[in-house]
Amino acid sequence: MIVEDQTMMRSALAGLLGLEPDLVVIGDVGRGDEVVGAAAAHHPDVLILDIELPGRSGLDVIPEVLRAHPGTAVIIVTTFGRAGYLRRAMDAGARGFLVKDDPVEDLATAVRQVAAGGTVVDPALAAQALAAGPSPLTRREQEVLAASDGGAPIAEMAAALHLSTSTVRNYLSSAIRKTGTRNRAEALATARHEGWL
């Protein structure tokens, strides 16, 4: 099953994989909030999943898909070859991570490998992820930074996250310090660029 928000890319992937004699594309969707339902309807052996999707991030749906269908192998195929995304995807249970710049033949090979129980990761990105190390941000710092998107006031963020305003300020200060930035907007941009959010 293919999850890709760009219709032309989704159709091209389905067409190219459909030419492989041993692969069958059984479904495709274009939104992150449609993935779990579509996986329940189609029961794919392999789920090819983009990260940046409308409705919900591909990274966020991996655990739900795997809880409902533990036999499904997830391959992330994304434009955003970031070490933080690779780490988050693999931590969530993905068994493959490729960037869209890779040849399409690599995708067909990856589908076969993960279906057979293997793992496939873009080698350059794997080296980058090892060199970069894990995200310095805690889960709560990530949540608070994400809530700051758009310049939301501290009180609004605190209410949405069910935290006190001083706790939100502390998490923001910690995230700013850990990212080596000057303010929450820069911290948010850095965390997104690194793939930590």
Image (spheres, rainbow, N blue to C red):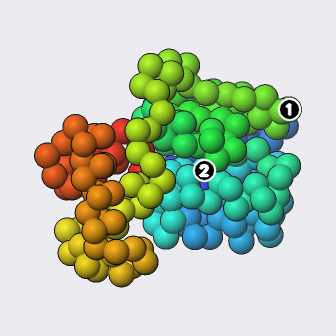
Could you tell which of marks 1 and 2 lies nearer the N-terminus?
A: 2
Measured as percent of width and height from the top left, residue 131 is found at: 44, 19
For mark 2, give the secondary structure: strand
Q: How many marks?
A: 2
Res. 175 visible in picture: yes
**Residue at the spot 22% in from the left edge and 37% down from the top edge:** 180
Residue 115 occupies quadrant: top right
Amino acid type shown at disc 2: Leu
Residue 93 image point, x, y percent = 69, 44
Identify the disc placed on residue 49. 2
Residue 146 lies left or right of residue 4; in this view the side is left
Residue 60 placement (x, y as % from top left): 57, 58
Question: In this picture, is 119 found above or below 79?
Answer: above
Residue 106 occupies quadrant: top right
Label 1 is placed on what type of residue?
Answer: Ala
Query: In the visual, does 48 lie left or right of 114?
Result: left
